Amino acid sequence: MKKIILALLLISSITTFSQEVKWLNSYEEAAKISKKTNKPILANFTGSDWCRWCKVLDKEVFSTEEFKTWSSENVILLELDFPKKKKLPQALQLQNYTLQKAFGVRGYPTIIVFKPGKGDDPKKDMVELGRTGYTKGGSEKWIASIAPFLPKQ
């Protein structure tokens, strides 16, 4: 019996530590989940296949267990990619450029924490809570820089 319990604990710990971060690429889906859970959206405006600092941010922060745990508890993740080498579907390109223009994003990486609008049109009346980019010092320091933007629960 003890062996079974130990085996189950081992399996659950492996599953927990290997959990992946779920980055959505649909604003509509992120807005719907944000409204349902009352969590803000953390939008990552990135040039995933060419932007050096975007890649560093991904490696030093977004790929860490600390970020995975923190993000699952606090935000809905939305990746808005502007790649140079790969081609995105036209509808996705249009969505990303529309949001880039709406938020006045001019460089990458730009991370914006916001609440979607109310009513039937979540793009109307979006409320920006804060923005940042790459912060040197790893996931702990980066998360600390984002924390003031989150609504108090």
Image (cartoon, rainbow, N blue to C red):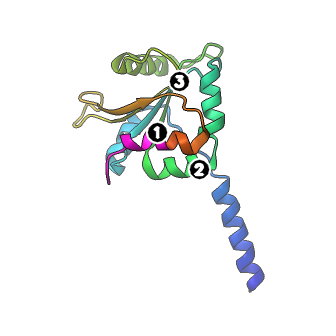
Choose mark 3 or mark 1, whichever is in front. 1
Q: In which quarter of the image is the N terminus?
A: bottom right
Q: Which residue is drawn at 43% across and 45% down?
A: 75
Residue 90 shown left or right of residue 120 in the figure: right
State the mark number for residue 66.
Answer: 2
The residue segment tinted magenta is 144-153
Residue 124 at x, y percent in the picture: 25, 27
State the mark number for residue 145.
Answer: 1
Q: Three-letter amino acid code at disc 2?
A: Glu
Residue 81 is one of the magenta-drawn residues: no
Nearest the camera: 128 or 23? 128
Lower sequence index among marks 2 and 3: 2
Residue at image mark 3: 109
Choose mark 1 or mark 2, whichever is in front. 1
Q: Which residue is drawn at 30% across and 28% down?
A: 123
Q: In this view, does 142 lie above or below 51?
A: below
Residue 1 shown left or right of residue 130 in the figure: right
Lower sequence index among marks 3 and 1: 3
User: Quick one: SS at disc 1?
Assistant: helix
Mark-to-mark CA distance, 2 and 3: 20 Å
Residue 149 is one of the magenta-drawn residues: yes
Badge 2: how crowded within 10 Å, few (<14), some, or many (20+)? some
Q: Residue at x 66, y 14 (%)?
A: 85
Mark-to-mark CA distance, 3 and 1: 15 Å
Residue 90 shown left or right of residue 113 in the figure: right
Residue 112 at x, y percent in the picture: 41, 30
Labels 3 and 1 touching (C-beta < 8 A):
no
Q: Three-letter amino acid code at disc 3?
A: Pro
Q: Is residue 91 above or below residue 28?
A: above
